[in-house]
Image: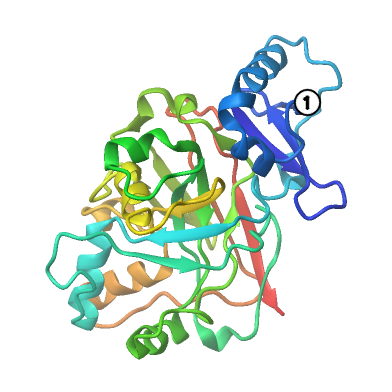
Amino acid sequence: MRFATLPNGTPDGRLHLVSRDNARAVPAKAATTLQAALEAWEELAPALEAEYAALNAGRAEGSVAFDPAKALAPLPRAWQWLDGSAYDSHGELMKQLVGFDAKQGLDILLMYQGISDRFLSPTETALFPSEADNIDFEGEFGIITGAVPMGVTAQDGARHIRLVVQINDWSLRGMAAVEMKSGFGVLRCKPRCSMAPVAVTPDELGPHWRDGQVDLPLEVDFRGARFGAANGHAMCKGFGDHVAHAAYSRDLVAGTVIGSGTVSNANFREVGSSCIAERRGIETLDLGAPKTPFMAFGERVRMEAKLPDGRPLFGAIDQAVAKG
């Protein structure tokens, strides 16, 4: 199934089912918000599946053309946003540059809790205080869970994944090092994230949902050129492991969002990057100094993961940055 949330004057918007070609949408009857659907997924999923089948067969009454530019984030506000750092190639590059190994040589998952009271829509201008904070985008994949009991295994954790999403995790790099070195967690360097307009159930990816990972390139366009197309299937561990990690000492409420961290591949010089910081790191290693500046007000970034035949999946995040 595919879901989108369209504005209706309320913070959570109105849940819609989206056709498999992302061309049509219809208000869901079984649930009015995505949060409501997630909280009663086992009960409501059969009805939602029937509505989705009717939409794809052209039998859904009240369907309209789907305009992703008008959509909110699929889950406009979430109970919890947990972001990982699952791509070791990205971590290794950062370790070479700053001499800091966040994993401390251990086989562990990295994860922090970020802001989730509102996710930006896929075309919403991102507002920031100052260009001097070193504005950066981070292209990620993510999942949204149902209710997860404390202490689940990775295998059981995967069973609680309800939806897959695409995320832009905005970062203010100028503040990040200071906050991380404080040992008190990150706050000001991590503003609101954005979500692509469509959330999909894992089966929509077909064979490209593999090992609990998105086996597709995330195409990032910036300053009029392809900036990166790193493949999502390079995580150190899949999303099932990330669910288990997050639920080690607590249960997770339905609607918990977990991110992969910046999508990165070991051959980053060939496939490019999903954030400016990584590109600047490569330039430092190869050229002795970074050359790519961070974002300036008025610039925009576009990112989208499509199926291999070009069919849309999550839709695109296409955002400009401006002074808040």
Q: Which x, y percent locates residue 50?
A: 66, 14
Q: Nearer the viewer, residue 146 or 139?
A: 146
- Residue 215: image quadrant is top left
Vertical placement of residue 309 versus 294, above or below: above
Name the residue located 49 percent from the left edge and 25 percent from the top edge.
204
For the question of whether residue 290 can be seen, the reply is yes
| Residue in front for this viewpoint, 69 or 182 | 182
* Relative horizontal placement of residue 66, taking residue 216 as reference (left or right): right
Q: Quadrant of the N terminus?
A: top right
User: Dot 1: within a 10 Å radius of its alpha carbon, few (fewer than 14), some, or many (20 or more) residues?
Assistant: some
Left or right of residue 56, residue 135 in this image: left
Residue located beneath label 1 in the image: 29
Colouring scheme applied when the structure was drawn: rainbow
What x and y, as percent, mark residue 165? 52, 44
Circle 1: element type? loop
Q: Amino acid at mark 1?
A: Lys
Q: Looking at the image, can residue 212 be seen? A: no
